[in-house]
Image (spheres, rainbow, N blue to C red):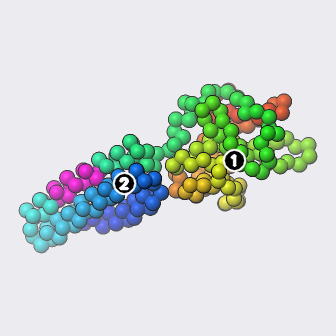
Amino acid sequence: MGLGVVTAVPTALTGVTDYSQLDTPQQRTGIVHQGANAIAAGLYAASWFSRSRGHHGRGRVLAFAGLGIAGVGGFLGGHLSYRQGAGVNRNEDLPEEVPAGWHSLGPADGFPPGRLSPASLGRVPLLVLRREQKAGAGPDVSVLADTCSHLGGPLHEGHLQEARGELCVVCPWHGSTFSVRSGEVVHGPATAPQPAFRTRVLDGRLEVSLTGAGE
């Protein structure tokens, strides 16, 4: 019980960090969730103290009260995650929305080099980055899902920066940073990578295929 009370402190600090990145409806639920957990931790601490003084009956009552409040906090935490989508990967269903094979996004020259450009593949928003190439070299194009995996920010409204030796896109909402080539997370708060697409140019048209999907 003592170990649980002590480890509640760093756990709560992690929750506060996550809370700062939520939107207003999620924060309303989150503050009650945090409050319930704080009360539960306080009751368990009181139970721990009572037991150490030999008052085991009072300690059991306080512990069961803490368990009840913790159950309420757990219910709210589940609602926050599963109903309100806090901390959920916003691109988890994308493989089901993108048909297998190659798909045209239009003329490759229609995407200005060096700029984050929006595109769409059916209902799926995409981010396109075409790079300048030496004369005679083929186009170098990276395509990611445009919806940030953290809280759904539009990545094409973000900016480019170098991080860990590679070019990255930074989400305009909360600063999540992803490799433009692989979609891997370079800096949080995002924990899930951005889906990356393979690219090719045929007859001047940019075509994409979701990485890992069949052709």
Question: In the rendering, at what x and y percent does residue 180 appear?
Answer: 68, 49
Report x, y in % for residue 153. Answer: 56, 49
* Mark 2 closeness class: few <14, some 14–19, many ≥20 residues within 10 Å: few
Residue placed farthest to the front in the image? 24
- Decide: is 214 above or below 149: above
Q: Residue at x 34, y 50 (%)?
A: 77
Q: Is residue 200 above or below residue 176?
A: above
Amino acid tagged 1: Arg
Q: Give the CA separation, mark 2 to mark 1.
A: 37 Å
* Location of residue 102 by image quarter: top right
Q: Residue at x 51, y 43 (%)?
A: 90
- Residue 94 screen position, x and y as percent: 56, 35
Q: Residue at x 65, y 40 (%)?
A: 126
Q: Is residue 70 magenta?
A: yes
Corner quadrant of residue 130: top right
Looking at the image, residue 173 lies above or below residue 137: below
Position of 53 compared to 137: left or right?
Answer: left
Which residues are drawn in magenta? 63-74
Residue 181: assigned label: 1
Does residue 52 show up magenta in the picture?
Answer: no
- The residue pinned by badge 2 equals 28
The N terminus appears in which quarter of the rendering? bottom left
Which residue does the image show at 28% across and 53% down from the upper left?
73
Query: Alpha-carbon neighbours of circle 1 within 10 Å: few (<14), some, or many (≥20)?
Result: some
